[in-house]
Image (spheres, grey):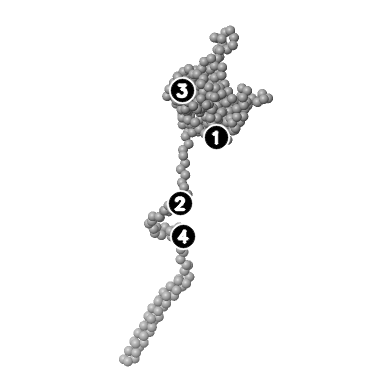
């Protein structure tokens, strides 16, 4: 009986040992397999930057303070707008007139042979005074002036100066538009200018544009040498003589006087015109005009005529 119990106990012991070995083997396999997988598994790959950026939270935009102006000692120069060409022409156009010099031709058939010289002029005083070239009115039997509005009036010569090729006329008309005058002493080479006049005597209020091509020119005209002329390539045709040369401000800077069509060798010339500077015109015109409109005392007038 004791032998049988001992044998049962041995069997149980062996069974427990076997079960322990099985359980231990299973746990060892699990742990060992895990260690092997950990040792030989590849390193984790980081997501590319653009992918990672997709999951990066975007901060809310914040206002960036702008620069604050600081005081400076440098003065600010404001640009002034230059009038357009149209504005410059419009400013002077109503002061430009057509001057018609009717001269009888020599001969028996004078009535049939009357000839006409056409030039231009500029209104210099609203009382009806007009400046033009002396060669435009020289030898006139009668003078007519066509105003900018088309009205035709008779004109008389107040005074002439052949040495300057200038003449002052008067018409019986009031409230005329006098042209504004500029400073010709500040003219520069290359400065844009406009010429206005009755081109060829048939096209009143014609406007041409050019530049100042030369300054202080001296040329002989009708036996006189005129100094200080402004040279321009603005087209000055017959009929433009006596008309204004204006700057881009619409101010008269010269009185157009003549052009050169060919040189001494009969070679053709183009774009060579001349104008009497405004400074010369005003210096001569001022005393006469002041006398006519009674702006200077009689004593000064008498002294000037002595």
Work out whether residue 148 can be spotted. Answer: no
Please state if 231 lies on the left or on the right of 92 as rendered: right
The mark nearer the N terminus, 1 or 2, is 2
Q: Nearer the viewer, mark 3 or mark 4?
A: 3
Mark 4–mark 2 Cα distance, whole angstroms, equals 52 Å
Q: Secondary structure at mark 2?
A: loop
Location of residue 217 in the rendering, given as x and y in whole percent from the top left corner: 61, 31
The mark nearer the N terminus, 3 or 4, is 4
Q: Residue furthest bottom?
A: 2
Q: Which mark is residue 72?
A: 2
The mark nearer the N terminus, 3 or 1, is 3
Work out whether residue 296 can be spotted. Answer: yes
Q: Secondary structure at mark 4?
A: loop
Q: Nearer the viewer, mark 2 or mark 3?
A: 3
Please state, as top left, top right, bottom left or bottom right, where the C terminus lies in the image: top right
Corner quadrant of residue 30? bottom left
Q: Which residue is mark 1?
A: 185
Please state if 178 lies on the left or on the right of 7 as rendered: right
Q: Which residue is mark 4?
A: 48
The mark nearer the N terminus, 2 or 3, is 2
Please state if 267 lies on the left or on the right of 128 as rendered: right
Q: Which mark is residue 128?
A: 3
């Amino acid at each position: 009986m004791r032998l049988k119990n001992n044998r049962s106990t041995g069997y149980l012991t062996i069974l427990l040992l076997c079960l322990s070995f099985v359980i231990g083997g299973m746990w060892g396999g699990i742990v060992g397999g895990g260690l092997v997988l950990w040792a030989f598994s590849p390193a984790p790959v980081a997501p590319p930057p653009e992918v990672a950026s997709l999951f990066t939270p975007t901060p809310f935009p914040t206002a960036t303070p702008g620069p604050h102006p600081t005081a400076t000692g440098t003065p600010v120069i404001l640009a002034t707008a230059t009038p357009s060409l149209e504005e410059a022409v419009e400013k002077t156009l109503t002061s430009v007139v057509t001057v018609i010099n009717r001269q009888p031709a020599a001969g028996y058939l004078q009535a049939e042979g009357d000839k006409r010289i056409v030039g231009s002029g500029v209104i210099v005083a609203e009382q009806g005074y007009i400046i033009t070239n002396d060669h435009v009115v020289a030898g006139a039997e009668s003078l007519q002036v066509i105003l900018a509005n088309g009205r035709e009036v008779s004109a008389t010569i107040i005074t002439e100066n052949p040495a300057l090729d200038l003449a002052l006329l008067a018409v019986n008309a009031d409230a005329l538009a006098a042209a504004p005058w500029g400073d010709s002493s500040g003219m520069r080479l290359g400065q844009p200018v406009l010429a206005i006049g009755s081109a060829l005597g048939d096209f009143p209020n014609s406007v041409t544009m050019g530049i100042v091509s030369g300054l202080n020119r001296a040329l002989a005209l009708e036996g006189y040498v005129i100094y200080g002329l402004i040279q321009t390539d603005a087209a000055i045709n017959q009929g433009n003589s006596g008309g204004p040369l204006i700057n881009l401000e619409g101010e008269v800077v010269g009185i157009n006087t003549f052009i050169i069509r060919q040189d001494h060798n009969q070679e053709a010339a183009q774009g060579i015109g001349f104008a009497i500077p405004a400074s010369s015109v005003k210096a001569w015109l001022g005393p006469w005009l002041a006398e006519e409109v009674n702006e200077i005392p009689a004593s000064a007038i008498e002294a000037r005529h002595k």
